[in-house]
Amino acid sequence: MTTNNKPNRLAVEKSPYLLQHAYNPVDWYAWGPDAFAKAKADNKPIFLSIGYSTCHWCHVMERESFEDREVAELLNREYVAIKVDREERPDIDQLYMAACQAMTGSGGWPLTILMTPDQEPFFAGTYLPKRQTMGRFGLMELLTQLSRKWSSGRGEITGIAAQIRAQLEQARNQPASGQWNAGLPKQAFETFASIFDEDDGGFGGAPKFPTPHNLSLLMAYGARADEPEALRMAEETLDAMWRGGLYDHIGFGFARYSTDTRWLVPHFEKMLYDNALLAVAYTEAYQRTGSFIYSQVTDQIFTYVSRDMTSPEGGFFSAEDADSEGVEGKFYVWTPDEVKEVLGEQAAQRFNYVYDITEEGNFEGRSIPNRIESALSEASERFGVSVEELEAELEESREKLFEARARRVHPHKDDKILTAWNGLMIAAFALAAKAFGVPEYADRAASAAQFIQKKLTGENGRLLARYREGEAAIGGFLDDYAFLIWGLNELYEATLDPEWLEWAQSLADDMIRLYGDEEQGGFFFTAADSERLLIRMKETFDGALPSGNSVAARQLLKLFQLTGEHRYREWAHRTLDGLSSQAASYPSAHTMMLMAGLSAQSSGPDVVITGDRSDLMTALMISEAQQAYLPHGSIIFVPDGEEGEAMRKRWPHLADKRPVDGKPSAYVCRDFTCHAPVMDAAALEAELK
């Protein structure tokens, strides 16, 4: 991606996205004081372009415009151009995406903003071609017209900028509504039921995003309200997603979204956060149903992440591109002849039949492997082999095709390590370690947590947001704290090592101090002492990622259950109350917040197990609690001896939880009422059900 042999200022950056633009003829600045000083000194407007390294349309706009000398000459002459990696600076992206949505009613990436030297936006858009085409305004026309308006008199521009700033201020400063509405989860369920796709799973039309926390809410609400329809919608969606081309049937892992209603044709980029949240949802589905396929899909996600998305130091990389060799999806698609060349005639015939690889193809003349229409029972009958024999052969064929695909040109990998997204994957591995009884998952989660502790934690204990090539930088945001607390809470319950719980508490205390809104409740996205942007934003929307506020509320409730510290529950309730008007305006877009609301409404069961860790019955009771579906519950273990006494001293709510008659004992509490202790795993299983 270069048309200029001379590097620009971005060549010294660490962001893979900024480095992709380091040889553009555009005289790019990174976000910072130098750019704003230049704009003010030269009295020029700012051209702000926000994207990320695996963004397909960002690549298109670069090829069409930012590598083009005519565009570069206009930008360099009339504007100060700034590039921002939205994954490194989600605070900047969040602010100007809100401006784009206020001005246009929609948003996306690349995000294109024109703004004053004081950072006030007066134009917002997304992808723009170089010249006007197919009804879409062209970048050259836009830049020319607005530079003339800037030079000839700015009344209109400054008026627009002031109006947009006022709108953003008004949205940010909505008064606290006072009380959480316990009926919102039911409203969200009814919305999902009204738009559920009975044919293909998922909700609404194309494009379809996984949004796994929507499915987590449906499963939790279904269990709480005894509503089987909620679980059915979640299951059918989970089944449809893994069967479709959204799932990489050769190398595993999920793509970002489906461009069609059938989950067949993905936008091929793979994001760490999608795969983390999907692993959580499939694990929860296994806990709810016991269905083997959900455990298999979860394990395959982890195979992909461990193989392709894990650094030698233990952290998790961010994303893989949709494009290779400049073509979207080229790495992932097949023809029947390509499969035959690898597998031979008979195995290829069977694989192509099961995975829908045909001469006509299902994507631009080639085929995306999928299982939308195929059933192994039907295929085994067709080919005269048992289902077990067919499964074994298909797996052997998949491995051979994976090896062959590995010799292709791979998509670009964004190898920066983000604290927030790593927190989500730590949570996913740890939850699965509990549900499936696989210690290796907990080891993987612990390795990533230790990486963050060593590499992304400052001397003052403050989190940093990004690590790449030995450099940790950028002060943490709310998501870094909230998502990592989630991971540590799950990791404590998976390992029962109190050091993880103590770190989670320390982070929660910092999160409240640095991000908490004492007046309105909830949390700001940026810390009190961080860089001051135009507006200090407070995000509540649970989109592709759940909001930091939603995760913070839910995990603070969890910390209250684990530690007995009332301040965590108070902050969670203040968050829910303070943001309830936003949730009430669109319940189905605040599903993680509704999960927190369900926990606040009726928490538990909280399980306290105490005894000798080496005792078989202790281990059996711990396993029983860890494998149970407890979306609003908690698990804590108090061992015998000095360690247990230290825990009782640190967390006084454990003081009376002791072995009965010297036997391992489990205490189950719901809504501040504890039942009589039980002394065996079967009794604990019955108590939890």
Image (tube, rainbow, N blue to C red):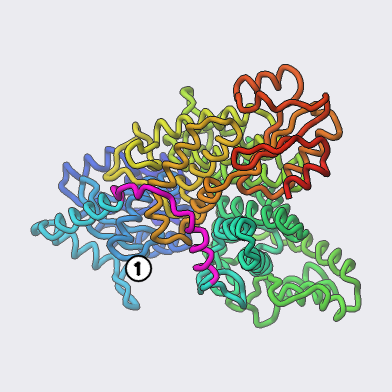
Kindly identify the residue that appears in the image at 20 percent across and 50 percent down.
116
Is residue 25 visible in this depiction of the protein? yes
In this rendering, would 655 be left or right of 159?
right
Closer to us: 213 or 386: 213
x and y percentages locating residue 454 in the rendered image: 57, 28
Q: What residue is pinned by disc 1?
A: 129
Residue 196 % position (x, y) = 56, 72
Identified at 32% across, 62% down, the residue is 125
Quadrant position of residue 440: top right
**Image quadrant in which you'd find residue 340:** bottom right
Q: Is residue 686 magenta?
A: no
Query: Which residue is most to the top?
Result: 642
Q: Measuring 33% from the left and 55% from the top, which residue is drawn there? A: 98
Vertical placement of residue 138 versus 532, above or below: below
Residue 189 counted in the magenta span:
yes
Looking at the rendering, the stretch of residues picked out in magenta corresponds to 172-193
Looking at the picture, tell me which residue is in the foreground, 598 or 2. 598
**Considering the image in quadrants, where does the N terminus appear?**
bottom left
In this rendering, the answer to whether 25 lies above or below 473 is below
